[in-house]
Image: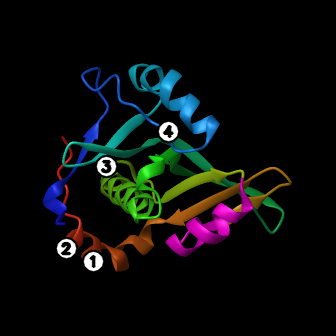
Amino acid sequence: MSSRDFSLKKITNTIPGLDFDCGDDEINEYFHSKIYEDEESGNCMAYFLFLKDDFIGFFTLSNSKLHLSIDGNKKSWPAVLLGQIGVQVEHQRNGYGSLMILLAKKLSFDLRSCSGCRILIIKTYKKHLYESFYEPQGFLPSNETDSYYDLFYDLNDWVSEKEEVIQNWDLDII
């Protein structure tokens, strides 16, 4: 399977009616009831990953801020929020979630030349997802509460990942 078999499509009103089930009720509900509204109102950009004509999953990106307390002083930095991400149940455990994270990093890295933003953030409500999925992808905790983790990735680290990803996953955004 080559990267030419994949396509990444920005959401449009020409892609409705896709069946989606990632096994997580909240993400499924977002996909089926809110994703088009968020995109149309300009609250996020949604990207759909396809393997040939088979819908693999989706992720959303939007503007946000990273808030940290450093030596008792609160600081914030502009950030890109990876707000939602989901892989169809039948495609899970095949590396597609990791691929979508890499694509989100690439899109965010490319955006920083226009916006000056160098942080990609995500929230997870499941500690095991941080430990098993996001931490190996280079995300670090910025805030831990009883109910969720705020995670961040410094896009300056993308430079060291970039060559491998571009060689293996040279995708066009349609």
Residue identifier under label 1: 164
Give the Cα separation between the discs numbered 4 and 2: 30 Å
Give the Cα separation between the discs numbered 3 and 1: 24 Å
Q: Which residues are magenta?
A: 126-140
Residue neighbourhood size for the residue with mark 3, other residues' Cα within 10 Å, grouped as few (<14), some (14–19), many (≥20): few
Say whether marks 1 and 4 touch (CB < 8 Å). no
Mark in front: 3 vs 1: 1
> Which quarter of the figure is the N terminus placed in?
bottom left
Q: Earlier in the sequence, mark 4 or mark 2?
A: 4
Give the residue type that dot 2 points to. Gln
* Image location of residue 123, percent across then percent down: 64, 51
Residue at 52 percent across and 21 percent down: it is 33
Give the residue type that dot 3 points to. Cys
Magenta segment's dominant SS is: helix
Q: Quadrant of residue 95?
A: bottom left
Residue identifier under label 4: 21
Q: Secondary structure at mark 3?
A: helix
